[in-house]
Image: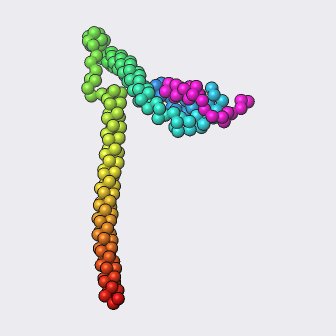
Amino acid sequence: MTTIRQDAWNTDEDLILAEVVLRHIREGSTQLSAFEEVGERLSRTSAACGFRWNSAIRKKYEAAIALAKKQRSKGKKAQGEQEEQSMNEEVSEELTQVNVAVQPPEIALEKKQEPVETNHDATLTMEKVLTFLANYEEDRKAQVAQTAYDELKKENEKLKAELDKAEQEKRIMAEDYRSLLSIMDRARKLSLFETSKEA
């Protein structure tokens, strides 16, 4: 049984963690799988690897993460197109076989020579689905960002109003203080005048 390390992470281990996580993202795997792989390599728990990634490493590799996600979607797109093409070929072949089986032999021979046309415009392709999902995600993020912006704007306006009110109260207090000092100064002068008059 291997002992689980609990010592501090070093730079090499951080690099291994980043490299494995980015590879898993590119390959379409989960980050949990990456944490488990790194945990086995470094004799650490997958939870420790996940914590290290989320608390310290991920922020440094945001651009690399975005690139890995793009590479993953391109790979999935290419794979989806290949699968779609092979599926269309299989469907076309099956349709041809069905047509041949159902029709009389002379018509079947004529049909076999004609290419089977498939209507790609009416079908839902993987590319269309991925494009829709990407646009949907961007729209959702934009909507969330706009909502956050509006809330911050309202809060900013509220704080500005409070600041204006505080500054106005400060001005009034300063004027009142000056008036009070002026009254006290006059009272002092008046008392001095009264004292000098009596003497």
Q: Is residue 39 magenta?
A: no
Residue in the picture at 54% in, 26% down: 15
Residue in the picture at 27% in, 13% down: 115
Return the residue found at the far right.
Answer: 1
Given residues 179 and 107, the one toward you in this image is: 179
Position of 72 with respect to 44 (left or right) is left
Magenta highlight range: 1-23
Residue in the picture at 38% in, 23% down: 74
Position of 47 with respect to 104 (left or right) is right
Q: Is residue 192 above or below residue 38?
A: below
Colour scheme:
rainbow
- Where residue 128 sits in the image (x, y, percent)? 31, 29
Given residues 174 and 63, the one toward you in this image is: 174
Given residues 58 and 74, the one toward you in this image is: 58
* Residue 82 makes an appearance in the image: yes
Q: Residue 123 sits in which quadrant? A: top left
Which quadrant does the C terminus fall into? Answer: bottom left
Given residues 56 and 161, the one toward you in this image is: 161
Q: Is residue 67 above or below residue 52?
A: above
Q: Residue 32 sits in which quadrant? A: top right
Residue in the picture at 73% in, 30% down: 1
Q: Is residue 199 above or below residue 81?
A: below
Across the whole image, how many numbered discs are drawn on residues? Answer: 0
Position of 109 with respect to 61 (left or right) is left
- Where residue 11 sits in the image (x, y, percent)? 57, 28
- Where residue 7 sits in the image (x, y, percent)? 66, 34
Position of 176 with respect to 63 (left or right) is left
* Residue 106 makes an appearance in the image: no
